[in-house]
């Protein structure tokens, strides 16, 4: 372990990926690798004639779409909260 980093090796399908990660992030990297493997296997069973490259592209695309959707949802949370408060104020004003 050097500078708060730990060397780990992850297996992604038939590939081994070695990298240095922050110690506090090791579990997240391992969980991410597991998720990628699960989604790769999903596409492997769904598209048995696809090449490994195609399967990884489908997997990457799915993960990117999920990431973008999560980011968009989080960016709207403050707006939704403000709208809820505004609606509550309008309703109170209408009731009085």
Image (spheres, rainbow, N blue to C red):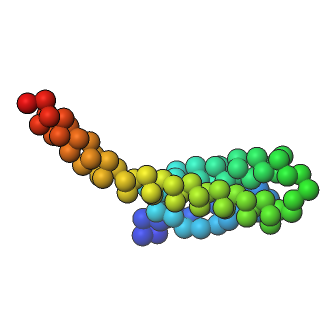
Query: Is any atom of residue 29 visible in this view?
Result: no
For the residue pair 41 and 82, the one nearer the viewer reads as 82
User: Eyeballing the image, is 61 above or below 91?
Assistant: below
Residue at the far right in the pictured view: 49
The residue at 8%/30% (across/down) is 96
Q: Position of residue 49 (x, y in %)?
A: 91, 56
Residue 1 placement, left or right of 92: right
**Number of residue marks:** 0
The residue at 87%/59% (across/down) is 50
Residue at the far top in the pictured view: 95
Q: Position of residue 6 (x, y in %)?
A: 51, 62
For the residue pair 2 and 84, the one nearer the viewer reads as 84
For the residue pair 43 and 37, the one nearer the viewer reads as 43
Query: Is any atom of residue 35 visible in this view?
Result: yes
User: Eyeballing the image, is 83 above or below 5?
Assistant: above
The residue at 56%/64% (across/down) is 7
Q: Position of residue 12 (x, y in %)?
A: 72, 58
Residue 24 lies in what quarter of the image? Answer: bottom left
């Amino acid at each position: 372990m050097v500078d708060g980093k730990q060397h780990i090796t992850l297996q992604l399908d038939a590939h081994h990926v070695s990298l240095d990660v922050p110690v506090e992030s090791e579990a997240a990297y391992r969980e991410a690798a597991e998720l990628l493997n699960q989604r790769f296997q999903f596409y492997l069973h769904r598209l048995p004639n696809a090449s490994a490259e195609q399967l990884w592209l489908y997997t990457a695309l799915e993960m990117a779409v999920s990431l973008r959707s999560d980011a968009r949802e989080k960016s709207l949370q403050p707006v939704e909260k403000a709208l809820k408060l505004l609606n509550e104020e309008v309703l109170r004003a209408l009731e009085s």
